[in-house]
Amino acid sequence: MQKEKYLQDAKTAAKEAGKYLIGETLKEINVEQDKDIKLYADKNSEKIIIDYLKARHDIPILTEESGELGDIGEGLYWVVDPIDGTYNFFKGLDLCCVSIALWKGSDPVLGVIYEFKNDRLYYGIVGEGAWCNGKSISTSEIAELGKASLATGFPVYRDYSDHALTTFMDSVQCFKKIRMFGTAATSIVYVASGKIDVYIEEDIMLWDVAAGVALVLAAGGAVKLEQGSKKWTRKTMCFANDKLKEKYLNEIFSN
């Protein structure tokens, strides 16, 4: 597997999409339903990425806007989110990014996350390392839940019942601080780069987290994924290290 070639093409595709998004000023709404919002910019950014990857690789693609392009099974496939943090982008907030990952079956291979408004390009290969704009990044060494920061959110498909929300809040009160950035990919890459210690989100779409999960593993962290309520949703937990993962799963998550 030519991982370096795949990584370079994912980086270039993300940068090309980011270049378009930086210049996009209209931000016209394509679909608005319940808690979700889609822009024409989502589709345009996705087309840039898909066209670039398809021209170079005969690999299936899973995307936020178009779904499954090709037969996705146990082999390689791209996972693309053309704008993660669409609402932030719509409102003019800097916390939004382009996210591209390569997975093999249920395992991440590499990830690229481009915070285009801040020109920060995160990328990494599982088992080989992770970087931001050429500088090596790694997860934090914090090993106590009471000293750890958590990034989380409330995705469209999660259970919003009183019981589900109460259970969730009970499970995260062990952390020192809780932050919500409005973009899962950014939240997870902050774990990979040591800015945040833990990320937990329920029923989040795979394309929201695929690149971030790869980057956390590449940067020395630990993850746990569980099937969500829909085919491509996952309960996603990312930790700075195995100690934090073990403590959370044994002391909190198992209760």
Image (tube, rainbow, N blue to C red):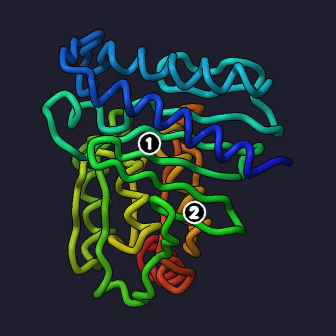
Using the rendered view, name the quadrant where residue 123 is placed.
bottom right
Local crowd size for mark 1, using a 10 Å CA cut-off: few (<14), some (14–19), many (≥20): many
Measured as percent of width and height from the top left, residue 46 is found at 48, 22
The residue at which mark 1 appears reads as 204
- Residue type at mark 1 is Ile
Tell which of 233 and 85 is nearer to you. 85
Q: Residue at x 60, y 59 (%)?
A: 124
Q: CA distance from mark 1 to mark 2?
A: 13 Å
Q: Residue at x 21, y 18 (%)?
A: 27
Q: Residue at x 27, y 68 (%)?
A: 170
- Residue type at mark 2 is Lys
The residue at which mark 2 appears reads as 224
- Reply above or below: 59 against 240: above
The local secondary structure at tag 1 comes to strand
Tell which of 104 and 27 is nearer to you. 27
Local crowd size for mark 2, using a 10 Å CA cut-off: few (<14), some (14–19), many (≥20): some
The local secondary structure at tag 2 comes to strand
Give left or right: position of 232 versus 118: right
Measured as percent of width and height from the top left, residue 21 is found at 32, 27
- Reply above or below: 143 against 207: below
